[in-house]
Image: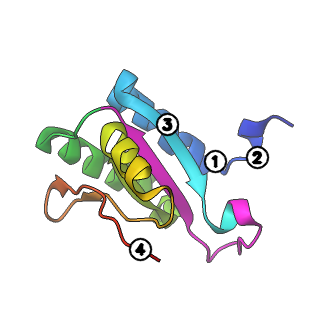
Amino acid sequence: MTQRARIPAVVVVFADRLHELLGKRLVGVYLGGSLVMGDFIERSSDYDLLVVVSGDLSSADLGRLAALHERLVDELPDAIRLEGDYVPREAFARWARATRFRSFARAGCSQSQNRCSRPTTSQT
């Protein structure tokens, strides 16, 4: 079995659609949370994702991403369980250097506010 075969189908479809939408601006889609930690509960756990992009996302990008999420939920009901953040690689790299991975801050795409936020740091 290949690595890709172990990834849930909805995550593969999401990553493929992101690649179609963002092209070379898509740096990577990273799967984490309960699925990779071995605590995943079928039919109740979500799919925790970190989507790293090159550069900031424009308002037009955010609109296309919101539409993508809506289409995915219509096509694949399991897509409602996709949760995660969109992070510009440059902001993520600055944050990672500054925090030395002592904490994890959410930086994401807000469909309701039509904007992406920068990561914030917090000490633990």
In which quadrant will I find the N terminus? top right
Residue numbers of the magenta segment: 36-54
Say left or right for 1 vs 77: right
Question: The disc labelled 4 sits on which kind of residue?
Answer: Gln
- State the residue position of label 2: 6
- State the residue position of label 3: 28
Q: CA distance from mark 3 to mark 1?
A: 17 Å
**Residue, x 13% and y 63% (percent of image)?**
113
Q: Earlier in the sequence, mark 1 or mark 4?
A: 1
**Residue, x 14% and y 56% (percent of image)?**
114
Label at residue 123:
4
Q: Earlier in the sequence, mark 4 or mark 3?
A: 3
Q: Position of residue 65 (x, y in %)?
A: 29, 46
Verify CB contact (< 8 Å) between mark 4 and mark 2.
no
Q: CA distance from mark 1 to mark 4?
A: 36 Å
Q: Earlier in the sequence, mark 3 or mark 2?
A: 2
- State the residue position of label 1: 9
- Helix, strand or loop status at disc 3: strand
Q: CA distance from mark 4 to mark 3?
A: 26 Å
Q: Position of residue 6 (x, y in %)?
A: 76, 46
Q: CA distance from mark 1 to mark 2?
A: 9 Å
**Residue, x 36% and y 52% (percent of image)?**
95
Foreground label between 4 and 3: 4
Q: Is residue 45 magenta?
A: yes
- Helix, strand or loop status at disc 2: helix
- Helix, strand or loop status at disc 1: helix
Q: CA distance from mark 4 to mark 2?
A: 34 Å
Look at the image and tell me whether residue 76 can be seen.
no
Q: Position of residue 108 (x, y in %)?
A: 31, 58
Question: The disc labelled 3 sits on which kind of residue?
Answer: Gly
Q: CA distance from mark 3 to mark 2?
A: 17 Å
Question: The disc labelled 1 sits on which kind of residue?
Answer: Ala
